[in-house]
Amino acid sequence: MKYFEASNSLFLLNEQQRNQFSRLEYYDYFYHLIHPDFHSLSFANFSLSDLWVYYYFEEVPIINSEHALHYLLRNFMLNEVLISSKFKRLKKTTIGSYTNALMAAVLTVNLFMDILSELLNSIPKEESNFYMKFENSSKQLFNDRFATYEHYPKKLVLIETMIIKSMRGYLEQHEATYTERKLNVIRFMDQFTITKRELFELPVV
């Protein structure tokens, strides 16, 4: 699947990292845990892969500036994670672990999808449907045929910019709620790692 291709990442990965990234296909069941309203949309699945990179590698790779300009919402969510000390705390349990990093990525993506679900209800239905339609096959917007007359659909940029502006405003106005949601992710991951250790690690004799 395209979600497991390193060329679609928001990060510039070296050869070793690209090989590690490609192994995500063996853990595709995590992608089915994405918020049900968004699990079939490309930006949600790509965001899960982006955040896996952040959580899995100790040193965060360089951002692909071209992709950051193309995928505005993905880049916004990633930046929110990069600047958060609370999300950074999760890396203590995720570095080097595919499953821990993926679970943290799922929880983080769903945190933003919950907020996005609320925001999409506040914009005109026609614009919401337009955004969903093109995000579901966003790679088609960048093929040579499309680029001959417009590099990126203006309407989509305007809607996506509006969504990002609304999300930024939401996070600022509901800072306490946002913080609590991040803490819930941390609490879940703490319990997840404890349960995983109890189930799969052999007791010391």
Image (spheres, rainbow, N blue to C red):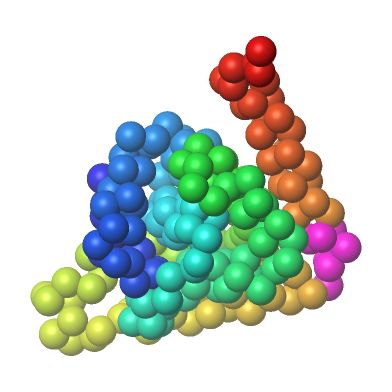
The stretch in magenta equals 173-179
When asked about the image quadrant of residue 187, the answer is top right
Q: Is residue 101 visible?
A: yes
- Examine the structure image and report whether residue 174 is included in the region drawn in magenta: yes
Q: Position of residue 8 (x, y in %)?
A: 30, 63
- Examine the structure image and report whether residue 23 is included in the region drawn in magenta: no
Q: Position of residue 32 (x, y in %)?
A: 46, 35
Exactly how many numbered labels are in the figure? 0
The answer to whether residue 6 is left or right of residue 188 is: left
Residue occupying image coordinates x 33% and y 67%: 13
Q: Position of residue 171 (x, y in %)?
A: 75, 69
**Residue 27, placed above or below residue 178:** above
Q: Nearer the viewer, residue 146 or 202?
A: 202
**Residue 103, placed above or below residue 87:** above
**Residue 120, placed above or below residue 194:** below
Q: Nearer the viewer, residue 137 or 128?
A: 137
Residue occupying image coordinates x 82% and y 60%: 179
**Residue 203, placed above or below residue 190:** above
When asked about the image quadrant of residue 1, the answer is top left
Residue occupying image coordinates x 63% and y 79%: 165
The answer to whether residue 133 is left or right of residue 92 is: left
Q: Is residue 155 visible?
A: no
